[in-house]
Amino acid sequence: MPQQKDIVKIAIQMPGAYPQLIQLDQKKPLSAVIKEVCDGWNLPGSDNYALQYADGVQMYITESVSRQHVSTDVTFAQEFISRDGHLLLVKIVEDSNESNVIMTHTLTGFMELMDHGIVSWENLSSVFIKKIAGFVNAKSTDASIQQVCLDILESMVLSSHSLFLHVKQEITMERLIAHLQVTNQQIQTKAMALLMALLQTAGDSDRKDMFDFLTKKSVRQYIYKNIIHSSGSVQDEMAHYLYVLQSVTLNLQEPRMRTPLDCCSQEQRDILHGLRQAAFETESENSLSHERRRSLCAKEFRKLGFSNNSNPGQDLSRTPPGLLALDTMYYFAARYPDAYSRFVLENSSREDKHECPFARSSIQLTLILCEILRIGEPPSETGSDYHPIFFSQDRLMEELFCVCIQLLNKTWKEMRATQEDFDKVMQVVREQITRTLSSKPTSLELFKNKVNALNYSEILKLRQTERLHQEETLAPPVLELKERLKPELLELIRQQRLNRLCQGTMFRKISSRRRQDKLWYCRLSPNHKMLHYGDVEEDTENPPIETLQEKIPVADIKGLLTGKDCPHMKENKGKQNKEVLDLAFSITYDVEEYSLNFIAPSRTDFCLWTDGLSVLLGREMSSESMRSELEILLSMEIKLRLLDLENVPIPDNAPVVPKPPSNFNFCYDFSQTEQ
């Protein structure tokens, strides 16, 4: 006869007895099955026994899942706790009469029971907590015992504020730090876990006291030298706690970051004026009249790069970064006075459009650093992305700012930026910082070297490489779509360039005497047939085309020259710097006997005009701006076209069209239905 589906054969074993092979009827109550097994071995009291899997995860079998699944250890825990077994373990710990081996097993068993959440940590006695803390504080205790005790104390601290206070009172911070300095990695990790639990649970005042103690004991330096730079690699659990320590420490900056400047605070106003006075050597202000002093301050605050020069405190009203931006600026001015003065004075001597505004840049840079370092965000339960450089510096935020504000000035010059390019420069600086930190530099000096080597041209190369790699990974149909879209988007860029030429641009005249006060304006006629130009005053904006007296027919333009090939660059050969050369272009007309010479206000204007003139001459556009814009437009257009295919795999080749059917006699005549 075939075996019934509810009856299975299983082997049951017990230490000291012969195994039994039984036919288990899964419809029977589990208690009846256990009684039959106990009767087979002549064991009284079947209620005291249970079935447990011998292979794999050795879990107990319960009545509710005996037919299909194994239960978790909570089954045993519930039964053990219901019979006050956990109180027996607590008593063993409180009496402390057992050997180290027994004590280790007792503490481990207790911890595993508590992990189920059946018994509240609040129910533990003061005697028990003192005993656990005593094991941690003792200088000569078995390492296995200390490891479990550190684990138990961490769970206590995280369970409630009252237990946090109790543990904080019992545990000796001196001994806890000593556990970080042992060679046993498990002890190190558990000690770090308890320390992080204490820091995260503490209130602001307690946390500050604990940080002061850690600083006094040079814990950061020890972690940097003996954990991060130890012979072995940092394990995942330790990496998480290093990340938490970094996060909790950096979050001490959050109150300043979220507090706007108070214009009524004399201290904060003094710091603002201290920044101004440190940058500019001025005559004694006490001898000046109120109006004269006010005018002088406004002028110098404008040179410092404040948007609201009459009331610079308004620039610091935005939160974040709030007062943290004032802190970083003041730290830079006080810690590196020469670099600070050089930054401000160098930009004060540039043309208004090309100066890099120190204050505005500092405020935005501080915000960028807050976002990169995640200041104000609570630590993630699974995060492990710590920065080794954090443990090499006492004031990482401020020191990073000092390096990056000088990097920003360098990048500004490399990009030949104007005020209109501010956001673009900040994006590049953010990318420079992010890319460098992702390489995990281990010191500030190493970070400084790497981030300065990652100049603007390197960023452009990396972006291009990543775009090419992205293209290589695109499916052939997507690449084909991209090629089909290019002509349409190039035409869009051409029209934009011509429209920009129709709007016109103001240019400066550069004479042999280096006078730069003469201005002229050039614009393309709406029908794209004439270039109109003429001298204008500085306060003139978008002069009407009728006021521009000179004009050149587009049909007479013979060529477009750039850089050192321009006539006005050849005339002043050896006198022009690279910045001017990169902004110079000329058009030749009337059989190339005459030329109209330009010095673009910015690299962006240079690209717009050279592209636009190339279009007028029937040539291909070749500027870096055109290539960048084309890539952006292509990327956006492809994403829009493929929105409906998200998460749908695109085949490399078009599907094979099936053969036509043998006949087409499957049409449905609706007219007959209507009749």
Image (tube, helix red, strand yellow):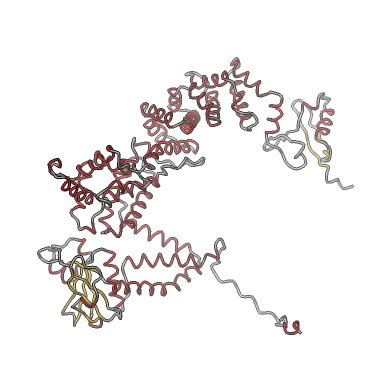
Answer above or below: position of 92 versus 245.
Answer: above
Which one is nearer the viewer's eye here, 186 or 495? 495
Residue 424's quadrant in the figure? bottom left
Which one is nearer the viewer's eye here, 50 or 185? 50
Residue 576's quadrant in the figure? bottom left
At horizontal 45% and vertical 65% (from top left) the residue drawn is 636
Q: How many marks?
A: 0
Location of residue 345 in the rendering, given as x and y in whole percent from the top left corner: 19, 49
Answer above or below: position of 602 versus 286.
Answer: below
Q: Residue furthest left?
A: 513
- Whether residue 360 sits left or right of residue 547 in the image: it is right
Location of residue 179 in the rendering, given as x and y in whole percent from the top left corner: 46, 26
Which one is nearer the viewer's eye here, 22 or 534? 534
At horizontal 26% and vertical 52% (from top left) the residue drawn is 357
Answer above or below: position of 35 versus 90.
Answer: below
Location of residue 151 in the rendering, given as x and y in whole percent from the top left corner: 54, 29
At horizontal 82% and vertical 27% (from top left) the residue drawn is 41
Q: Residue furthest front?
A: 290
Location of residue 300 in the rendering, given as x and y in whole percent from the top left corner: 20, 49
Residue 385's quadrant in the figure? top left
Give the quadrant of the C terminus. Answer: bottom right
- Whether residue 239 sits left or right of residue 493 in the image: it is right
